[in-house]
Amino acid sequence: MRIVVLGSTGPTGRQVLNTALQRGHDVVALARRPDALSDLAHDGLAIRQADVRVPDTVTSACRDADAVISALGVRRGAPAGTLSAGARAIVDAGPPRIAWTGTFGAGASARRAGLPYDVILRLVLGDGFADKSVADEVVTGSQGTVFHPVMLTGGPATGTATVVPLDLLDRSWRLMPPKVSRADVAAAMVTEVESPAYAGRTVAVY
């Protein structure tokens, strides 16, 4: 498959790149600063400059992709609408499969992560908290799959992460959600674009 990865320079995006390449896919890494990926060298990897603030650069890069995986993140103080702009740019390209990284505790999973975590998340994301929900809706409306992982760690892949549609998740956390490794989330996202099981849905990963 030809998989385009948005947000490829971040810690989750790096895990997506590694997983997709290890599984033998041709990968196009999109980066606002391609030099940030200069340490990577792989015959199956191409690096292309793209910026969600210039949506056409993302849309053009995603055309003809078999799948797009987004690990795009946002921090407090980021330009308004950053995430939803990225989501719309991907959807406009019309790839057959999309896996999008959302945030547990925002959007459809709001108030399920625990009160302390909810407060922290809103403070960290600022205006980006509401944009999370908008971006998720754009992707699910295009039959993409939105992933809401719980607290992310830098640990190795364990192969034990649980993926379940959010509407079937029978638990919430009162204080703080559990943890899951970025490597396990990346593996779940690559698996989803290889063999879609949750198109048009939001899934929790824990």
Image (tube, grey):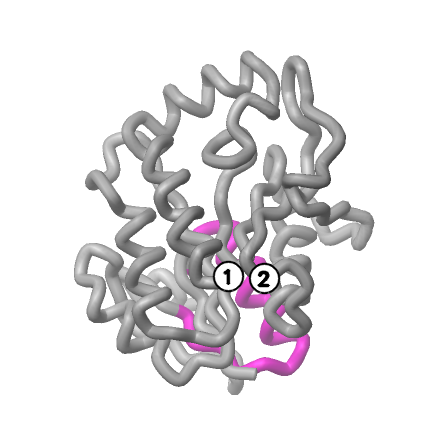
Query: Tag 1, which secondary structure?
Result: loop
- Check disc 2: other Cα within 10 Å, few if <14, some if 14-19, many if 20+: many
Q: Residue 69: where, in percent of width, then height?
A: 49, 64
For the residues bearing labels 1 and 2, Cβ distance under 8 angstroms: yes
Within the magenta stretch, is there residue 87?
no
Q: Amino acid at mark 2?
A: Ala
Residue 121 screen position, x and y as percent = 45, 24
User: Is residue 22 rendered magenta in the image?
Assistant: yes
The structure residue drawn at horizontal position 60% and vertical position 69%, both measured from the top left corner, is 193
* Cα gap from disc 1 to disc 2, whole angstroms: 5 Å
Disc on res. 144: 1
The x, y position of residue 16, in whole percent, is: 56, 62
Asked whether residue 55 is in view, the answer is: yes
Residue 41 visible in rendering? no
- Above or below residue 130? Residue 143 is below
Q: Amino acid at mark 1?
A: Gly
Q: Nearer the viewer, residue 204 or 24?
A: 204
Residue identifier under label 2: 199
Q: Which residues are magenta?
A: 8-29
Q: Nearer the viewer, residue 158 or 146?
A: 146
Residue sitting nearer the eye, 127 or 36: 127
